[in-house]
Image (cartoon, grey):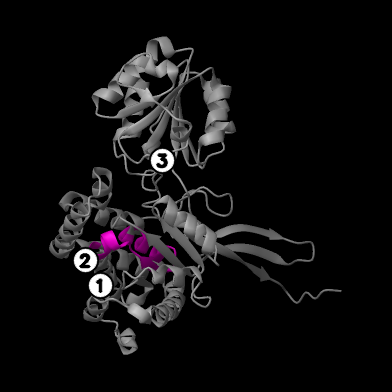
């Protein structure tokens, strides 16, 4: 069993000792202490000047590079376990880190440092007739808990974004990425401490025990302000159902590409292949292709053939099955499925109204794209489709905070409160009012 006394240790050696043991019945007190340390660190981070937070981010990026050997060795162990456990290729791709991908992680952390400081921004000002002057000022949220599964890069992305926005982070990695995430977290702590900031501002939950998730969802006695789940549908559903604190999340990434009657075929082909196959395991991967019947005679067969030749299974309606014997019949369930694999559902629709209706019925309000040269049709689609991200003549794989210029993202939210779409540093801030008077009192 883990002695609680170890929770007072903040060195890297303590982190490694904790991370290699099963917390067992000590999960509850371990998590309470984790939350208390995060709350204490959050106040210091919120008050830290921008220059110091940026210095820490650059030191974190450097530590990720200098620790590449240990990080990649840990990832190799995680990958070996995943393969032995029979995980599919898409899962392995989400879990995999190599030298190039790790360098991209470090670059993303560096790019976060280059972002404008979101803390202390003056969001609005006005003066009342009585002379009181009001300011709405951006402030950190506090302590953000991120629960994720197989993507170890989330450790760095989430830690960097929370630091830049003046927040502390509690990160709970999935068991599949636990070793890799532990090594990445050690690098982040090194960077924080090198800049004179508390390492406890970014803490990885040091146990694989699933009871830690339940503890986080209680809010840890008020020490957690927001929970962000990054993972499969079952994880997100549990978090949304059980959390006693606000949640930024999306349940599914059931994304669509609609090829309108005025679409250029060559453009549509490139967008569809990229949207589906660039990386099939990301939440912005297209899962359904809708082809307008106005162009089906010229566009449907080439698009389906391109997908099939690229190794993508196609599940289609009757019209789609008729053009290629390799197409299997789509079921009602397929239209609502996030495959996260080399599978796509294809349907011919009688026009833009039908496309929008299909997306509204089966979609998850995540990301949708229209391919068309008709600006009026594009305007209708962008206006009427109620998803967090809607694109015209571009791949759904741009559903990524880095591509939005946010540096990185902590997740994508499909709710309608506070944050929607990629959650970057601005979305990780709340606000307060500063009121300036000259002796006013209420009559």
Q: Name the residue under label 3.
A: 338
Query: Height in image: 110 above or below 389?
Result: below
Q: Which of marks 1 and 3 is nearer the N terminus?
A: 1
Q: Which of marks 1 and 2 is nearer the N terminus?
A: 2
Q: What's the residue at 31%, 73% (across, down)?
A: 206
Q: Residues within 10 Å of mark 3 (few under 14, many from 20)?
A: many
**The C terminus lies in which quarter of the figure?**
bottom right
User: Disc 2 versus disc 3: distance between alpha carbons?
Assistant: 36 Å
Helix, strand or loop for disc 2: helix
Foreground pick, 33 / 54: 33
Residue 157 among those drawn in magenta: yes
Helix, strand or loop for disc 1: helix
- Discs 1, 2 touching: Cβ within 8 Å: yes
Q: Which of marks 2 and 3 is nearer the N terminus?
A: 2
User: Disc 1 versus disc 2: distance between alpha carbons?
Assistant: 7 Å
Query: Height in image: 143 above or below 108?
Result: below
Q: Residue 29, percent across and down?
A: 41, 83
Q: Residue 400, percent across and down?
A: 38, 45
Span highlighted in magenta in the image: 155-180
Furthest residue to the right? 443
Q: Residues within 10 Å of mark 1 (few under 14, many from 20)?
A: many
Which label belongs to residue 63?
A: 2
Judged by depth in the image, the label closer to the viewer, 2 or 3, is 3
Foreground pick, 412 / 105: 412
């Amino acid at each position: 069993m883990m002695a609680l006394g170890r929770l007072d240790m903040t060195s890297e050696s303590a982190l490694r000792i904790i991370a290699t043991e099963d917390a067992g019945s000590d999960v509850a007190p371990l998590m309470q202490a984790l939350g208390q340390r995060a709350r204490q660190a959050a106040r210091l981070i919120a008050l830290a000047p921008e220059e110091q937070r940026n210095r820490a981010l650059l030191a974190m990026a450097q530590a990720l590079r200098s620790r590449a050997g240990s990080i990649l060795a840990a990832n190799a162990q995680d990958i070996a376990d995943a393969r032995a456990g029979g995980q599919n290729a898409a899962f392995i791709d989400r879990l995999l880190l190599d030298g190039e991908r790790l360098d991209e992680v470090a670059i993303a952390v560096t790019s976060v440092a280059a972002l404008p400081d979101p803390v202390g921004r003056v969001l609005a000002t006005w003066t009342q007739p009585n002379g009181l002057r009001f300011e709405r000022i951006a402030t950190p949220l506090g302590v953000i808990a991120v629960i994720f599964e197989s993507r170890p890069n989330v450790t760095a992305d989430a830690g960097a974004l929370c630091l830049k926005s003046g927040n502390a982070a509690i990160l709970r990695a999935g068991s599949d990425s636990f070793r890799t995430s532990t090594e990445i977290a050690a690098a982040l702590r090194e960077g924080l401490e090198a800049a004179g900031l508390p390492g406890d501002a970014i803490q990885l939950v040091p146990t694989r025990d699933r009871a830690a998730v339940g503890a986080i969802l209680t809010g840890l006695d008020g020490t957690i302000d927001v929970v962000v789940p990054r993972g499969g549908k079952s994880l997100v559903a549990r978090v949304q159902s059980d959390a006693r604190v606000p949640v930024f999340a999306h349940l599914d990434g059931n994304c669509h590409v609609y090829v309108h009657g005025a679409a250029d075929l060559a453009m549509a082909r490139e967008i569809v292949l990229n949207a589906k196959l660039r990386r099939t395991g990301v939440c912005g991967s297209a899962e359904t292709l809708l082809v307008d019947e106005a162009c089906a005679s010229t566009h449907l067969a080439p698009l389906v053939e391109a997908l099939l030749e690229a190794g993508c299974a196609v599940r289609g309606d009757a019209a789609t099955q008729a053009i290629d014997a390799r197409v299997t019949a789509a079921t009602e369930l397929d239209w609502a499925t996030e495959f996260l694999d080399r599978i796509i559902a294809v349907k011919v629709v009688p026009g833009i109204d039908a496309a929008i209706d299909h997306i509204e019925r089966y979609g998850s309000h995540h990301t949708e794209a229209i391919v068309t040269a008709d600006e009026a049709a594009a305007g209708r689609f962008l206006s009427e489709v109620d998803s967090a991200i809607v694109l015209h003549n571009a791949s759904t794989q741009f559903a990524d905070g880095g591509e939005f210029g946010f540096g990185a993202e902590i997740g994508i939210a499909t709710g309608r409160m506070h944050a929607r779409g990629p959650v970057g540093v601005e979305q990780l801030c709340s606000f307060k009012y500063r009121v300036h008077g000259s002796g006013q009192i209420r009559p």
